[in-house]
Image (cartoon, rainbow, N blue to C red):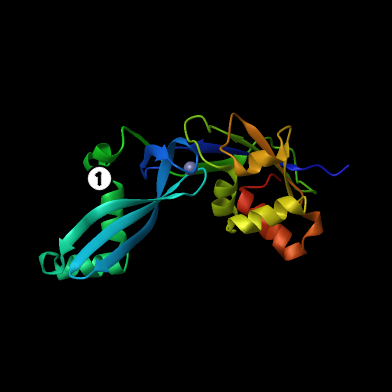
Amino acid sequence: MAHAARILWTLHPADTPCPRRHCPGCGTARAFRSSGRIRLNANGRRLDAWLIYRCTICERTWNRPIFERMARDKVPATMIAACEMSDPHLVARLERDMTALGKLSGRIEGGLPLVAKRCDVAAGAATSGARVRIVGAAKAPCRLDRLLARELGLSRAGVASLVGAGVLALEGSPQKAMVRQIVGDIVLLVRPSGLPEVEGAALLAALGPQPG
Ligand SMILES: [Zn+2]
């Protein structure tokens, strides 16, 4: 029988802090991740600006105030422009302002983890799919479908469609774990045989270095 490439993903906490707050969607405290987008709202002569965060589990938004109810002529034009374009420098400064975050949240967590990818076992050239062991989630919590979407260059809907087609599956975990926070070490099975060849090859390449 054809054997699958064995790949190891080790999750490391990312450096973008995620404040933990009560999430009305989940009904409990959750880590919120910055969307990188600023919303500027004009109400008469008053301006509000928020950095938009999302619950890492249910995606409920939290508008983190940058300023609120400020007289328009008191806000520097450069600040208004930066908010209008969700300026990456302003966003990064806000995301990493631990003093400000500390006032909004009692606990700050890391962001969507960084993933170190390597061959798990040097087993010779794989001929069929891959078996990806994902470890380290205890220190770098995240939702599996969000992680896969980023790592595979897909939307979450794209990930869901691969799950539906049986291209992505979990070994020894219920399928609903795909849309939950990763608990413990998990094994992702990737079987791209039903995909067009180019798509399948791109999917396998995104998983990391292939043995052989
Ligand atoms: Zn939530």
Residue depicted at x 58% and y 53%: 149
Residue depicted at x 81% and y 55%: 193
Task: Decide which of 194, 23 is in the foreground and name it.
Answer: 23
- For disc 1, the marked residue is 97
Which of the image's four quarters has the N terminus? top right
Can residue 132 be seen in this snapshot?
no
Give how far across and how far down residue 125 sits, in percent: 75, 46
As drawn, the residue found furthest toward the left would be 74
| 112 shown above or below 140 | below
Residue depicted at x 51% and y 29%: 138
As drawn, the residue found furthest toward the right would be 1
As drawn, the residue found furthest toward the front would be 44
Residue depicted at x 51% and y 43%: 57
Determine whether, in the image, residue 195 is placed left or right of residue 63. right
Q: For the residue labelled by badge 1, is the local secondary structure a helix, a strand or a loop? A: loop
Can residue 49 be seen in this snapshot?
yes
| 43 shown above or below 31 | below
| Identity, as a three-letter code, of the amino acid under mark 1 | Asp
Give how far across and how far down residue 98 sits, in percent: 26, 40
Give how far across and how far down residue 158 sits, in percent: 64, 58
What is the number of callouts on the image?
1
Disc 1 packing (10 Å; few <14; some 14–19; many ≥20): few
| 72 shown above or below 143 | below
Determine whether, in the image, residue 105 is placed left or right of residue 132. left
Give how far across and how far down residue 55 sits, in percent: 45, 45
Image quadrant in which you'd find residue 202: bottom right
| 203 shown above or below 121 | below
